[in-house]
Image: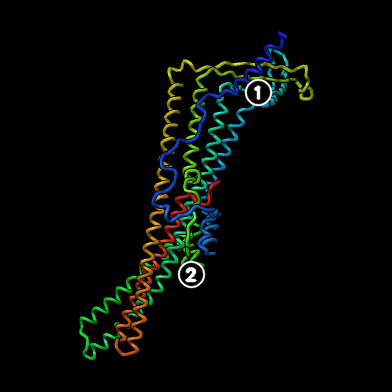
């Protein structure tokens, strides 16, 4: 019994102490005030199931294809994916440190020696050795356990950052696509306005030739035409910029998507209601908030690592070797030699270096907690502001569309007066131009509403809840 006691202690003590990791244990992120819901933005959102691929609610197949293409080929997403793989490899390295390390060796040496005395003969010597060195440090204070906790948190953080990159990328693609279709639709309407202004200019010149209009009238109508023509250049640039953005976002060179996107298509249309799920789940859903929480968890574990390194640490090194003068007898058990070397290390006399490391880890944890609170508050502000802008944009669009309807009614009544001879064709041209101007402004308002919806999707991290 007495001979077994040291063995029982050697085996049982590491197992017992290995379960006692140095603290603190991570208890989850701190509560942040204001996370129960939204105040002003609640009027334009409703609870309900959230579409995983949020852009599909816009009902545009080409947009869907562009987002999928971007998520598959964008360098920003590929970079984030590489960081996930890197963090996973680091975790596997840390987990392997729990196991004994074994280093096998094979030595083969042959020497040709000179004679040791006058008249002696040269001699040869052959030495073969097969052996292994093993080392193991029991995790008495949970250093490896806390290190693995920190590494797992790093993997989760990298995954959250990947999701954040995907959210940002999908929003950028959708915004560029909406800008493209908006510019293309307004380009067509501006061309119609230019045509109407040219017609009006020709009519006023005819009147001037007949002596019923002045040169000032001609100059005014020509100025109106020039103003209409000036609107075309910025829209053409907006189309080209949006095409370039979409090409780069999908991992292509600028210009490669021009042929596929050149034909104008209607602007994506939103449903009557926008479902964003439960606003109270915002904190758990946004990838950047999840990344901040995982950083806090990892930094908390690092405190335990630093504290564990202050304690005495015991390691074991084992050596096994078999040697022979011939290769055929190298595995002869009778030549085996072995040794076990325990080593006790303690950094207690490091002049406060270890305690300073613990204080550094605590400060990093406190900083990560502050970053988490800031991330939550920024997320709430982003979401609240996005919802407010979306609601205001919808109200503005209602007024713009009402104004467009009034202009169209006025144009129809004007056509009747022209037919009755109580209004001129020149006056009707002006009314038609006003209809197109109102339509251009309404189109801009509709694009603004869709862009603001995209901002909501990005602010809430819609579709990336894993």
Image x and y of residue 318, in percent: 66, 19
Number of numbered markers? 2
Tell me which label, 1 or 2, sits earlier in the chain. Answer: 1
Image x and y of residue 373, in percent: 42, 39
Badge 1 crowding class, 10 Å Cα cut-off, few under 14, some 14 to 19, many 20 or more, is some
Is 223 in front, or is 438?
438
- In the drawing, what numbered circle is on residue 265? 2
- In the drawing, what numbered circle is on residue 134? 1
Is 331 in front, or is 318?
318
Badge 2 crowding class, 10 Å Cα cut-off, few under 14, some 14 to 19, many 20 or more, is some
Q: Which quadrant is the N terminus positioned in?
A: top right
Is 274 in front, or is 43?
43
* Residue at left offset 59%, top offset 33%: 93
Residue 75 seen by the camera: no
Query: Under tag 1, what secondary structure?
Result: strand
Residue 112 seen by the camera: yes
Image x and y of residue 125, in percent: 72, 20
Q: Report, in whole angstroms, how far the alpha carbon at label 1 lies from the one at label 2.
A: 69 Å
Image x and y of residue 57, in percent: 52, 60
* Residue at left offset 53%, top offset 49%: 464
In the displayed structure, would residue 439 be above or below residue 210?
above
* Residue at left offset 72%, top offset 14%: 120
């Amino acid at each position: 019994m007495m001979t077994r006691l040291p063995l029982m202690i050697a085996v049982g003590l590491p197992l017992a102490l290995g379960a006692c990791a140095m603290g603190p244990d991570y208890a989850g992120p701190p509560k942040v005030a204001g996370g129960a819901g939204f105040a002003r933005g609640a009027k334009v959102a409703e609870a309900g199931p959230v579409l995983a691929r949020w852009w599909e609610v816009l009902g545009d197949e080409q947009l869907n294809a562009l987002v999928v293409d971007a998520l598959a080929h964008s360098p920003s997403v590929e970079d984030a994916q590489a960081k996930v793989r890197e963090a996973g490899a680091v975790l596997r390295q840390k987990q392997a440190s729990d196991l004994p390390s074994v280093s096998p060796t094979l030595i083969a040496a042959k020497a040709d020696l000179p004679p040791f005395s006058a008249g002696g003969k040269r001699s040869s010597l052959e030495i073969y050795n097969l052996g292994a060195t093993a080392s193991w440090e029991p995790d008495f204070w949970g250093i490896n356990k806390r290190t693995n906790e920190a590494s797992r948190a790093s993997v989760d953080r990298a995954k959250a950052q990947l999701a954040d990159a995907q959210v940002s990328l999908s929003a950028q693609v959708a915004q560029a696509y909406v800008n493209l279709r908006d510019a293309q639709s307004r380009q067509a309407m501006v061309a119609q306005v230019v045509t109407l202004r040219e017609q009006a200019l020709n009519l006023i010149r005819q009147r001037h030739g007949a002596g019923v209009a002045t040169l000032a009238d001609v100059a005014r109508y020509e100025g109106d035409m020039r103003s209409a023509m000036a609107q075309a250049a910025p829209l053409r640039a907006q189309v080209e910029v949006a095409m370039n953005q979409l090409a780069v976002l999908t991992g292509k060179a600028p210009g490669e998507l021009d042929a596929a996107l050149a034909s104008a298509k209607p602007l994506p249309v939103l449903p009557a209601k926008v479902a964003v799920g439960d606003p109270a789940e915002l904190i758990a859903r946004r990838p950047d908030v999840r990344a901040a929480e995982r950083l806090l968890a990892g930094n908390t574990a690092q405190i335990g690592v630093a504290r564990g390194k202050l304690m005495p640490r015991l390691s074991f090194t084992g050596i096994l070797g078999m040697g022979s003068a011939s290769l055929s007898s190298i595995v002869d058990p009778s030549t085996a030699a072995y040794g076990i070397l325990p080593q006790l290390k303690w950094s207690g006399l490091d002049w406060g270096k270890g305690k300073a490391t613990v204080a550094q880890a605590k400060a990093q944890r406190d900083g990560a907690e502050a970053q988490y609170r800031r991330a939550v508050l920024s997320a709430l502000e982003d979401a609240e502001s996005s919802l407010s802008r979306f609601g205001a944009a919808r109200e503005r669009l209602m007024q713009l569309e009402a104004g467009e309807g009034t202009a169209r009614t006025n144009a129809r009544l004007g056509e009747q007066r022209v037919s009755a001879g109580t209004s001129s064709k020149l006056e009707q041209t002006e009314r038609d131009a006003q209809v197109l101007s109102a339509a251009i402004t309404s189109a801009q308002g509709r694009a603004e509403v869709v862009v603001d919806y995209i901002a909501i999707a990005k602010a809430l991290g819609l579709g990336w809840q894993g």
